[in-house]
Amino acid sequence: MSHLDPITMEVIHNALSTITEEMGVALSKSAYSTNIKTRLDFSCAIYDYSLRCITQASHQPAHLGTLYHLVPNMIKEYGIENLSPGDGILVNDPYRGGSHLPDVTLLSPVFIGSDVFCFVVNMAHHQDIGGGAPGSVPGNSTEIYQEGLIIPGVKFVEKGRIIENVFKLILANVRGAEERSGDYRAQVAANNLGAKRLKELVNKYGVETLKKYMDGILNYTENRFKSNIGNIPEGSYKGEDYLDDDGVTDKPIRVAVEITVKDGELFIDFSQSDKQSRGPMNGTLSCTYSASAYILKCIIDPEIPVNSGFYRPLHIVAPKGSVVNPKPPAAIAGIWEVGQRICDSITKALSQVLPGRVAAAGKGTICNISFGGVNPRTGKVYAFYETVAGGYGARPMKDGVDAVQYHLQNTENAPIEELEMNIPVMITRYELITDSEGAGKYRGGLGLRRDYCFHDHTATFSVVADREKFAPWGLFGGLEGRKAKFTLNPDSTNPVRIKSTATVKCNPGDIVSVQTPGGGGYGDPLRRDPGKVLDDVRNEKISLKRAKSIYGVVIDPHSLEVDYKATEKLRETLREKRERC
Amino acid sequence: MNKSIKCRVGCDIGGTFTDIVLLNEGTGQLRIVKVPSTTVNPEKGVKAGLKKIFDTSEMKPGDVSYFFHATTIATNAIIGQVGLKLPKTAFITTKGFRDILEIGRQTRPRLYDFFMDKPKPLVPRYLRKEVTERIRYDGSVLKPLNESEVKKIAKELIEEKIESVAVCTLFSFLNSKHEKRIGEILKSEIPEVHISLSHEVLPEYREYPRAATTLINAMLFPIVKKYLEALEEELVKMGLKKSRLYVMSSSGGTMSFSRAKNRPVHMIESGPAAGVVAAAFMGEIMGRENLVSFDMGGTTAKVGLVREGKPIITTDYEVGGTTHGGRAVRGSGYPIKVPVIDLIEVGSGGGSMAWIDKGGIIKVGPQSAGANPGPVCYGLGNTEPTITDAYVSLGVINPEYFLGGEMKIDAEAARESIRGKIAEPLGMDEIEAANGIAKIANSNMVKAVKILTVERGLDPRELVFMAFGGAGPMVAGKIASELGFPSIIIPETPGLFSAYGLLVTDIKLDYSFTYLCKVREIKLNELNRKIVQMERRGTTDLMSEGVPADKMLLQRSVDMRYVGQSYEINISLPQGEVTVELLEEMERRFHSTHERIYGHCCITEPIEIVNLRLSAIGILPRIKIKAERKGKEKPSREALKQRRKVYFGEKKDFFLCPVYDRYKLSPGNIVYGPAVIEQRDTTTVVYPGQIAKVDAYRNIVIERG
């Protein structure tokens, strides 16, 4: 890097990341769907002429590695020579490197003279892309074709304008076409802006200088990541975890990883994972890549920039035909559930060697909720999609956060008043779940309950979630968090269990209760500060009964004071009992 | 002494100093004193400062026509400053929803950090109470209010010794019946406790921000009331008139002490707004209605925007939040949806430190050495190089004339720290490193200015750049020219300019309500009735602030969006009855604004209105600033203090450049860059290729030569 000036490098790096951020602002503000706008379910990036990621502004970690595969695959397939200034290529095909179908990506070349200099790219999660269930995340699909429209990489924009024929074809296949059309326009506007800003940067520095510094930025990132990996003791570390089932059968799915640290590089081998599943619980190679990249960034270097230099020391083995790299036409609606489990298994593996850098397992599911029907207020078809937060895993020295998004997702909730004004649903409860934490010296975060009532019409309700059978695990003596629970009419005389991946019909008056898992604990619950247990009891986050039986803390139910003597005695007894077992 | 001559007093309490400014309304003469702030009882510091200023003035406390106060007490209380204990507060809401405050937006503020936390809930769960009741999306009552539950809660609150209560039930902005009733019952059961009702504090939809805003109002109420009453007592004792006391609000206007006590959430950003108000005022005098205000001090640089003479306001603000690269990190603080002057703040001030990151790249800020110990060159113990140290090393700051020579500057220590901490580890020379620090800090600030201009579809070439604060005039020439601003304005006293903003403001009261409706489906009668109601409230309130009818100005606006969007754009609504024609005009304005900001619009798409807003303004008498006659272009011989070697980063060498004394420059003078202009409170740099003119108001106007 000696011939590069570290000052210019920082200034150019700053300018490049400002462009992707600015694209994100334009996209989120002018989009229509809540999903893109307020839940920020999108990412923007710049790729260079040799298809390397230069910078990515990621609001959703799930998109980290998906663009990394999709962009080069797509441009190679389409042919860089077939692109003209003002073109835009639209793609959502998981088997070309994409995520699930609702994540639609627009790639636009930026020409300097007659040559492609860079690509500006944005990926946004659309509320619906057609297919068998409103929201396009069906819980029962067995082929990708049931999940919505596949866009294999088609020219969507020409000379800066949307090609109307193609647009019509897409809109004819999706629910809520009016809203959707605004989202596609916003994606085009974001790329137009990105291209404009990149050209301004070229005017300032010139193509050659920028190219030189882009190389420098990637090398800087690679060296930094490698030196951090170098601090991890060399060796091989194994971790495994399970998904409830594939949505069609009851058979659990195993995700297993072996991580080898050697010479400042990481070899991440998923060969021991299960074969691809029949139902929608399949990751794709780019999902596996994203999830691995995300969790390694968290554990090893949270502040490292996201570009190709960061990916260079990562080597991933995911056998074709496995749950982490299925063959078409496998269904993949549950892709990010697999992704969350990949994060969990990698965390488990590295907890053996980096105990102070990891958290216990948290919610562990994206918890995709989608529903739709005919809106009795308007007579029109509606579709809605959202995800529900849950407990975060406990951390060394710290409790897990209650009711927060986990790992690969960070999308906001829909305000209840806004939701009810737009859509014929009524939320009847939205609250933390008492006693859902995984107990520990540091406890896991509480899960969340959100109940949906369809009071005046028939609706189709899909859940694509997980951790209904396998609870979020604790670490170093910490206990499991409460599992997920999905129930039709929970408080009635006849509650019906809904599996974690399912699509159900709701009759007028029906309520669906979504209850997300709590996070796992860290350390022995008998060593938890009794004062903290008391706080949780007072706040009804933990029941008196649980305080006593799990934490060994005796609290007077009337005065709400800890009986320290009795606590000490009880803890002693519980310890002895534990040893006897 | 002429009894008819009055004075205005501004009082700004900062973390370290309390600034008092006094303006003689007759002569326009400005006087300032700085006294140490007294954190626990801030009114004591104010009293000391006022005593000091009146002791040396021909004015007496009884001559004060307006006392304007900016305070950060509200923010400090929320972010947990020592000595300000938040009152024990309870929250009451619809059954099933007591956790909305704790769940918030359900996101984590930092994506890749396992150790992140959401902002701590301001009210613990056991003090969040639920009542059976439910109002639906259309305002109809699904479940009536269970009044006996409310009475039971009242008893519990007494036992808990609650000092304040916030009430926010679902859809109360559409139908306030239940919230009102809860308020009545609490009032009669526990009359001594303050109650904030969400439909009164913020009758807008989206339950979480409304609940949070209401809660913060409730929590601030006892603190602000106690503080303002104590201050009022001191001031009245000194001889100021009770009816003349005003507090600056977050939206850049002022309101009387008695009103501020009832709506404390409106004074959260009372302090920082003043600089933008001052810039708007100076812009108006100079005939520059569109400008960026750039205030760079010791720890941060704050960028504000003035359009058509008015500071830009946002209603998307979080108190106690963090920022990243100038952007507020959503979900890191507590949302308050009242109007706040929109400021982008970056950690680039004179005291911001330079450091080398793990990969060998220079970074500047956000860590700051502040004013104490301050930059290395202050010699007060800091050894990490700062932006100020860089400018000392480059020869821009005169070590012999810092604060007019009152403060000793150790230039060698500054150079030494840059050499040892930055230059040597990276194998570069010391001057290159100092220049690099300046460049990187500039690029951070350029980004902040971009966020407020180009990201909002505004072209810097159509704006002017007004720079102030202790460090602003030093860097303005670089930042503004990089972004293409045609001219830069440096006011006469950049260090005092913010405080000046306190003296030139108007009374301003803000109101809003949600009226969600497609434009084409609006029932004009109903809408007009609601607008008239809001305006009547504004007029009545202005009257009680003592504003005569001919000084009232009602500015109305509408938040609009395409149907299905969930982000609104504020469009001003002209006076008069709303008619079909006016709505069509509003639609046209919306399309063109959307086009400007987001680069596209769709005239076939239906539009809906979301909120109606009103700023009820009481216009205060304008301060007159006299234009002086312009003299010679060539500065007088005495104005040229010396020639000094200064490094501008061009041609990689020092320039022997002229240094002027600002106090000896007079209107009409022209200075050709490169040049440095010194005054007590700041150093202005005229970069190579720029020329600086002193205008009739003694502002320096820098343009490209």
Image (cartoon, helix red, strand yellow):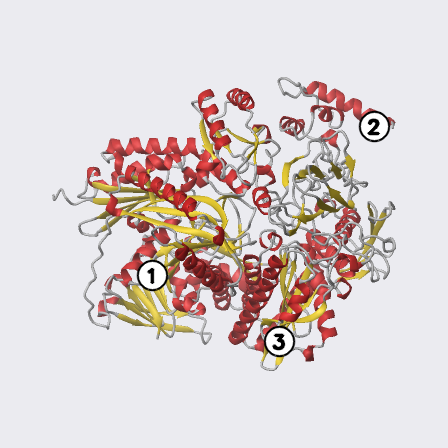
Q: Amino acid at mark 2?
A: Arg
Q: Residue at x 81, y 40 (%)?
A: A469
Q: Chain of mark 3?
A: A
Q: Are marks 2 and 3 in contact (CB under 8 Å)?
A: no
Whether residue B162 sits left or right of residue B71 in the image: it is right
Q: Of residues A47 and B309, which is closer to you in this image?
A: B309
The quarter of the picture where the N terminus of chain A appears is bottom right
Asked if badges 2 and 1 are on one and the same chain, I answer no
Give the quadrant of residue B170.
top right
Callout 2: SS: helix
Q: Chain of mark 1?
A: B
Q: Residues within 10 Å of mark 2 (few under 14, many from 20)?
A: few
Mark sitting earlier along the chain (2/3)? 3
Q: Residue at x 71, y 21 (%)?
A: A567
Residue A310 visible somewhere in the drawing: yes
Whether residue B260 sits left or right of residue A125 in the image: it is left
Q: What mark, if any, has residue B289 been given in the picture?
A: 1
Give the quadrant of residue A513.
top right
> Foreground mark, 3 or 1?
1
Which residue is tagged 3?
Answer: A117
The quarter of the picture where the C terminus of chain A appears is top right
Which residue is tagged 2?
Answer: A578
Callout 1: SS: loop
Q: Position of residue B233 (x, y in %)?
A: 30, 30
> Foreground mark, 2 or 1?
1
Q: Residues within 10 Å of mark 3 (few under 14, many from 20)?
A: many
In the rendered view, tell whether residue A461 sits above or below residue A7: above
Q: Amino acid at mark 3?
A: Phe
In the rendered view, tell whether residue B190 sits above or below residue A189: above
Residue B397 visible somewhere in the drawing: no
Q: Amino acid at mark 1?
A: Glu
